Image (cartoon, helix red, strand yellow):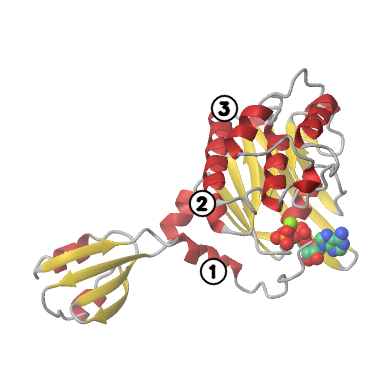
Amino acid sequence: MTEANGVVVRTRGLTKSYGTKRGIVDVDLEVHAGEIFGYLGPNGSGKSTTIRLLLDLIRPTHGTAEVLGHDAHNAPLELKRQIGFLPGEMALYERMTGRDMLRYFAYLRGMSDLGDADSLAERLEADLSRPIRALSRGNKQKVGIVQALMHRPALAILDEPSSGLDPLVQQEFYRILREVRADGRTVFLSSHVLAEVEHTADRVAILRQGHPAVISGLAELKAQALRKIELYFSAPVSPQEFSRLPSVRGVRVENSMLELVVEGMVDDIIKVASRYRVENVISREQDLEEVFLTYYHDNTEDVGEGT
Ligand SMILES: Nc1ncnc2c1ncn2[C@@H]1O[C@H](COP(=O)(O)OP(=O)(O)OP(=O)(O)O)[C@@H](O)[C@H]1O
Ligand SMILES: [Mg+2]
């Protein structure tokens, strides 16, 4: 690869205003080679705007965007061919069959065959034999994904790729993304739902009103999350004993069950609990959704403005 220091996407102060309307403001991103980067934000927060800037489909008001080591605006054709793109709102060639359209894309990309198209189509259960216009939304989306990945791009930029896919196909799609990563290639993936990136992304940026409110490893983000532990005792116990422990953020009592909201280690809790007869302990996965939603707040302005 030609990108410097393994940085595949780099934006500096990237800003796009639509007249007086905010698009994105001062976005600084670095996406590393071989990672899946999740670009999250509510409707209208600027995901598609950022992606269009990376692909040089629109020009920034300020700032710069580099892809694969070149300014997005001056990237040579050879380099652009190493990018796979799935737009948020796809305009496909409605009268062509999926296969004809993929042949056309292969031709534009200078490919000698259809690359991975057939195996991708099979795995996603995409029907390439029917005219695109005859396909349902989800089935069109599958053809779009095949189109974006068929040439084994060094960088895949996917705008809300799993919207409209049913759960089984979604799982297969996530497997495909992990294989792309295992292959040392890079995925930039936008979504407005955490679940879509939670099981694939290494790092995420969460956009809020056109600007990343946070850029973090998913594991680090998870570590910030509070955990819930339910302790089922044989007889009611005093909640105060638990609420004064340093790791306990909150206690809820229900008969002889205590539900604790916990930050960090559970050692002190277990030691206190062990003084009583414990029937069951349920420790829930840290709730990333709650962390995520805290960054989503104050976004009333964004709602309903998506394009
Ligand atoms: N062509 C345009 N003209 C004017 N304003 C625009 C245009 N495109 C986007 N915007 C505005 O820029 C902001 C960001 O829009 P964008 O489409 O990037 O959001 P998004 O995060 O992709 O949303 P969604 O989840 O709905 O796809 C919104 O406020 C939107 O109204
Ligand atoms: Mg969008």
Left or right, residue 268 beside residue 35: left
Q: Are marks 3 and 2 in contact (CB under 8 Å)?
A: no
Q: Quadrant of ligand 2?
A: bottom right
Q: Find residue 99 and report its horizontal and vertical position in percent.
A: 76, 32
> Mark 2 = which residue?
198
Find numbered disc 1 in the image and state the secondary structure of the residue it sits on.
Answer: helix
Identified by mark 2, the residue type is: Glu
Corner quadrant of residue 148: top right
Q: Earlier in the sequence, mark 3 or mark 1?
A: 3
Residue drawn 78% across the image and 52% down it:
89
Q: Position of residue 257 (x, y in %)?
A: 21, 75
Extreme residue toward the top, this view: 112
Q: Is residue 74 above or below residue 291?
A: above
Quadrant (top left, top right, bottom left, bottom right) of the C terminus: bottom right
| Viewport quadrant of the N terminus | top right
Q: Position of residue 28 (x, y in %)?
A: 70, 50
Mark nearer the viewer, 3 or 1: 3
How far separated are the C-alphas under marks 1 and 2?
16 Å
Q: Tell me residue 246's x, y (percent).
A: 28, 69
Q: Secondary structure at mark 3?
A: loop
Which tag, 3 or 2, sits closer to the chain's start? 3
Residue tagged 1: 294
Question: Label 2: few (<14), some or many (≥20) within 10 Å?
Answer: some
Q: Is residue 204 left or right of residue 246?
A: right
Q: Is residue 46 visible?
A: no
Q: Looking at the rendered structure, which numbered label has been put on residue 183?
A: 3
Is the residue marked by circle 3 packed among few (<14), some (14-19), or many (20+) residues within 10 Å?
few
As measured in the structure, the alpha-carbon distance from the residue carrying label 3 to the one carrying label 2 is 20 Å
Q: Which amino acid, by three-letter code, is at mark 1?
A: Thr
- Residue occupying image coordinates x 41% and y 56%: 223
